Image (cartoon, rainbow, N blue to C red):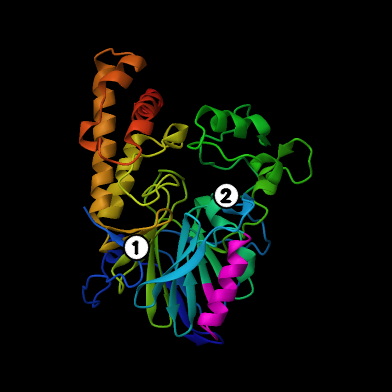
Amino acid sequence: MVGAHGASRCVGVAPSAVRGVAPIRRRRATPAAAALYSPAHSFAGARVVASRHLRFALVATLAATSIGVASAQPRTPPREISQVTGDLYRARNGNWYTVFLVTPDGIILGDPINETFAPWLKAELDTRFPGKPVRYVIYSHSHFDHAAGGAAFAETATFVAHENMLRNMDGRYPQMPGDMIDRNDNGVIDREEIDIPTNTRPGVCGMGPGFFDGIDRNGDGVATPQELQLHIVKPAIVYNDRMRIELGGKAVELVHPGLNHSNDATVMVFPAERAAFATEFIADALVANNPRSLPSACGPFDGSPLAEWIKSYRTVEALDFDLMITGHGSMLVDKALIRETRELFQHLRDEVAAGMAAGRTLEQLKESVRLEPYKDWANYERLRAYNVEAAYRNLLIYR
């Protein structure tokens, strides 16, 4: 179906069909200009059908997320665009990354990242790909340091996310990263709810200096969810399990992996490019140039059961792609990383669970659970004991 902006459709398919879109020929993605690390405005003609459950969120307002981490910095972070393969590109804002796919009828974009990066990216896209506006913005998840800035594309783009993003933007305290939880259950963000994790695990959990003052926009000493999310555009289309979007003869498949770093994650799979994009639970913000890294494990483990994290990795392992593009870290990674990370989580969970069953204390576990197979992974010395503690506290809640 062709409308004023060309051919576009969102097609829901059965879960089994998402893994391969016949008759697409299998071919390995070839990174062009990136390092490979190996061991709510719909337009005429759009058609949307859900796999299991898809609903339109009839929201026309800009709700928006807070200042992203990079935007709180005094200096502009390094920004660049690099080709991944074919018409698939990666855009960088410091150690935050997004992706976009160029088609004859426009662009499918991942996260806008934040309200200072997004206008820069729009200007770059307008210059490099004239006449091809962004038609879709697909959120990897709702956290403020990835989802802000969408207003730059709101004139031409439809915003898409997992349905849980609407819950995280309905005015209640949202699911938050970095152990920034509503400790006193008052429904707003207090300074100490940022300061406690920041001071307890500096450089790992919480946020940087000045973050709270940036989101307390009226200076009343608390930050409401609306203040936090000021620069996030609410999704106009949400899905439950899986969804396929087609534009200009190209496609992206959206998959909800389950609970992990967030409760509203989306993995973007580009079938023709043999590539996928995911953030945080694949590589968190501590990852720089080595994707094999112990997780930050804040929360503990962001309030999601370890069993659900492991299930998320299995879901991604089963998807049909070769190359993983991450939301953090300078490198592209081989699909084998997903299996290796899942095995790390299983090893950690099993060792800690066995120690707990044997009656060991937390301090004894921190000494005895050495994670030996992962001693060469990044952040091993820094985070091993904390990973053990986080697993212990997670298992106390989610036996």
Q: Residue at x 67, y 60 (%)?
A: 62
Please indicate whether residue 383 sits to the left or right of residue 322 in the image: right
Q: Position of residue 172 (x, y in %)?
A: 63, 42
Residue 40 in view here? no
Asked whether 236 or 335 is in front, the reply is 335
Asked whether 357 or 277 is in front, the reply is 277
Q: Position of residue 270 (x, y in %)?
A: 34, 69
Magenta stretch bounds: 115-135
Asked whether 36 or 342 is in front, the reply is 36
Residue 365, above or below 220 = above
Identify the image quadrant of residue 117.
bottom right
Q: Residue at x 27, y 59 (%)?
A: 319
Instruction: Sort mark 2 into few (<14), some (14-19) or many (20+) by Cα contacts within 10 Å.
Output: some
Upstream in sequence: badge 1 or badge 2: 2
Disc 2 marks a residue whose amino acid type is Val
Residue on which disc 1 sits: 276
Asked whether 157 or 220 is in front, the reply is 220
Identify the image quadrant of residue 365.
top left
Disc 1 on helix, strand or loop? strand
Question: Mark 2 and mark 1 in contact (Cβ < 8 Å)?
Answer: no
Disc 2 on helix, strand or loop? loop
Q: Residue at x 49, y 67 (%)?
A: 80
Residue on which disc 2 sits: 69
Instruction: Sort mark 1 into few (<14), some (14-19) or many (20+) by Cα contacts within 10 Å.
Output: many
Residue 340 in view here? yes
Identify the image quadrant of residue 293.
top left
Residue 129 among magenta residues? yes
Disc 1 marks a residue whose amino acid type is Ala
Of badges 1 and 2, nearer the viewer stands 2
